[in-house]
Amino acid sequence: AQSVTQLGSHVSVSEGALVLLRCNYSSSVPPYLFWYVQYPNQGLQLLLKYTSAATLVKGINGFEAEFKKSETSFHLTKPSAHLSDAAEYFCAVINQAGTALIFGKGTTLSVSS
Amino acid sequence: DVKVTQSSRYLVKRTGEKVFLECVQDMDHENMFWYRQDPGLGLRLIYFSYDVKMKEKGDIPEGYSVSREKKERFSLILESASTNQTSMYLCASSFGGVTGELFFGEGSRLTVL
């Protein structure tokens, strides 16, 4: 069955530091993978998605993620954190039937000045 | 811009009450979803619908039902609310297959006393 595991429920970085949020997936079929972000008191919005094209996916706000099949990973990175990046981030994979997304438990990113 | 509107941002209900959570999208999307979000558990799929009058159970449908009489509207119903249904409820919609982007509403925070 499809699933995602986000390593680390909280990540804290300083402004300007590298952001690395980890996601590992389990999938019995070639996966479609997503990263969503949720700012306080808002719904989720799509950051980026992997749909079996390029393994390095660029998203909004300077984020990118690399699909590594050998490591079953889809980690999210940003070279330089901004204060405005503070939010909760969710990794997701399409379910086996291809009908809905299965989300990870989320990682809260804190950015300090 | 796509807009997904959830009718109530905050609700307080009593145990045993019948609760309706309404969701409307304005982009003619076929697919609509209800998720439940709890701290440390991420998002869990309750029900989804891929067409008018069609519904499919997600991972945690017990205690919930849904209604989709019109394409733009997807309602989540708690027939007899219980305290363990206190949560944030998120509605989402998408066009075509779920490989497309999910658009989320801002959420409805339900407290059952």
Image (cartoon, rainbow, N blue to C red):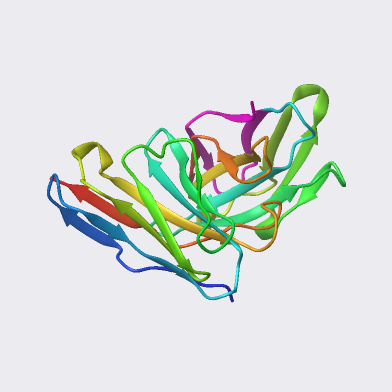
Is residue B18 positioned above or below A2 on the image?
A: below
* Residue A16 can be seen, yes or no: no
Q: Which of B72 and A16 is in front in this view?
A: B72
Is residue A103 positioned above or below A27 on the image?
A: below
Measured from the top left, where is residue A32 in percent x and y?
A: 73, 42
**In the rendered structure, which segment of residues is drawn in magenta?**
A1-25
Position of the C terminus of chain B by quadrant: top left
State the residue at coordinates (26%, 52%).
B110
Measured from the top left, where is residue B66 in percent x and y?
A: 40, 54
**Most common SS among magenta residues:** strand
Outermost residue on the top side: it is A70
State the residue at coordinates (60%, 45%).
A100
Q: In this view, does B34 lie to the left or right of A15?
A: left
**Residue B107 appears in which quarter of the rendering?**
bottom left
Measured from the top left, where is residue B24 in percent x and y?
A: 45, 70
Q: Is residue A20 magenta?
A: yes
Position of the N terminus of chain B by quadrant: bottom right
